[in-house]
Amino acid sequence: MNDNVAPVAAAVIEAEAVVSEAALLVEVDVTPPRKRGRPRKDAAASNAAQPVMALVEVATVAVAVAAAQTPPSTGKKKAGRRPASPSELVLTNQAALQYKAGRIAELLARLYPNPPIPLDHGSTFQLLCAVLLSAQTTDKKVNECTPALFQLAPDAAAMAAAEQADIQACIRSLGLAPTKAKNLKAMSQLLVEQHGGQVPASLAELELLPGVGHKTASVVMCQAFGQAAFPVDTHIHRLAQRWGLTDGKSVEQTEADLKLLFPEHQWKELHLQIIFFGREKCPAQRHDPVLCPVCAWAAVPPYNKAGSSPLKAGGAKAAKAVKAAAATTSRADGKAAKRGRS
């Protein structure tokens, strides 16, 4: 047993033994009265119960003291995230969807040959902070806040030493500012204590940091360390469904589908290319697919209608529409192949 837990367990066991022994000595019933009927008025029993109750109070205090001696949790998250598997749609229509994905990748590469990282930063640590802050807000708003934040705390050591209130003041215009300020400080403290103030180049270790999820860790891995990762957020998830490349029930499953459809060397650029394309040409609301360079030929029902946006991930209608479109694409590819042989 852990040395920190032992005093608590010992106090509880001892308290239970003392209470049981005292109850037997005074022969008193310490069970609560029945719900129905009048409670028994037994002065002798009431007087006899007093020492038992006193012992219970003493034991309770002992447990509280022992618990207070136990050091608080470090807040470190548990490992063990299991990667999602590709959807049945992609597994059963892989060749047709890879062809479609290839056409989309070619178009995006022409539009955005060298996509820049949209978050301003001067180091890997600052990129990690900026990506953490980007949840539930826009990159533009993050870039407006980070100059003051990084002047206050340019590295992990400075962020760990800064007051949480000062951190929050720098990012107060962002959504969830109190939680993000708390996570920035806790994350920085863990980096200083366990990684010498440096950002680890490991997806698993990044995901153990407070406030860092799989998407944030994936962005840092591919954009800062050049490792193979395909960060998928709700925006990429939305476009992948609109284009019929997935019917994933979550962003994790959509990530697995896209990794199967696009070659690994394209992941880093595609992550940014799809984001820029969604902002400039393929918005979620009031979108006309006829005027969209991709949706004009790639969007699947019901997303090919003006003003449409993907249904809830994993919805029955969405899955049916995507499967039908994949089958149509497969038949068209078969006909094209026959014409090429003739």
Image (cartoon, grey):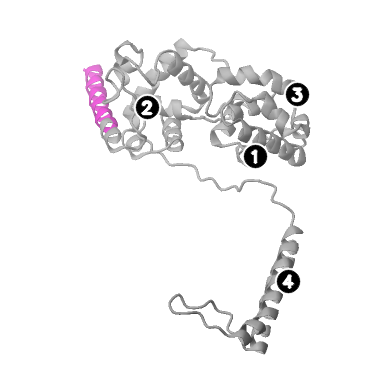
Residue wearing tag 1:
209
- From the viewer's perspective, is 16 left or right of 266? right
Q: Is residue 202 above or below residue 3?
A: above
The quarter in which the N terminus is drawn is bottom right
User: Mark 2 and mark 3 in contact (Cβ < 8 Å)?
Assistant: no
Q: What's the distance in space between the residues labelled 1 and 4, CA to CA?
A: 40 Å
Residue wearing tag 4:
58
Mark 4 or mark 3: which comes first in sequence?
4
Of the residues shown, which amino acid type is indicated by label 2? Gln
Give the quadrant of residue 234.
top left
Mark 2 secondary-structure assignment: helix
Q: Nearer the viewer, mark 3 or mark 1?
A: 3
Mark 1 or mark 4: which comes first in sequence?
4
Mark 3 secondary-structure assignment: helix
The local crowd at label 1, few if under 14, some if 14 to 19, many if 20 or more residues have their Cα within 10 Å, is many
User: Mark 1 and mark 3 in contact (Cβ < 8 Å)?
Assistant: no
Residue wearing tag 3:
152
Give how far across and how far down residue 194 sits, in percent.
74, 41
Of the residues shown, which amino acid type is indicated by label 4? Val
- From the viewer's perspective, is 97 left or right of 84? left
Magenta-span inclusion, residue 4:
no
Magenta range: 322-342
Mark 4 or mark 2: which comes first in sequence?
4
Give how far across and how far down residue 264 sits, in percent.
50, 28
Mark 3 or mark 2: which comes first in sequence?
2
Of the residues shown, which amino acid type is indicated by label 3? Leu
In front: 9, or 77?
Answer: 9
User: Mark 2 and mark 4 in contact (Cβ < 8 Å)?
Assistant: no
- From the viewer's perspective, is 46 left or right of 58? left
Of the residues shown, which amino acid type is indicated by label 1? Leu
The local crowd at label 4, few if under 14, some if 14 to 19, many if 20 or more residues have their Cα within 10 Å, is few
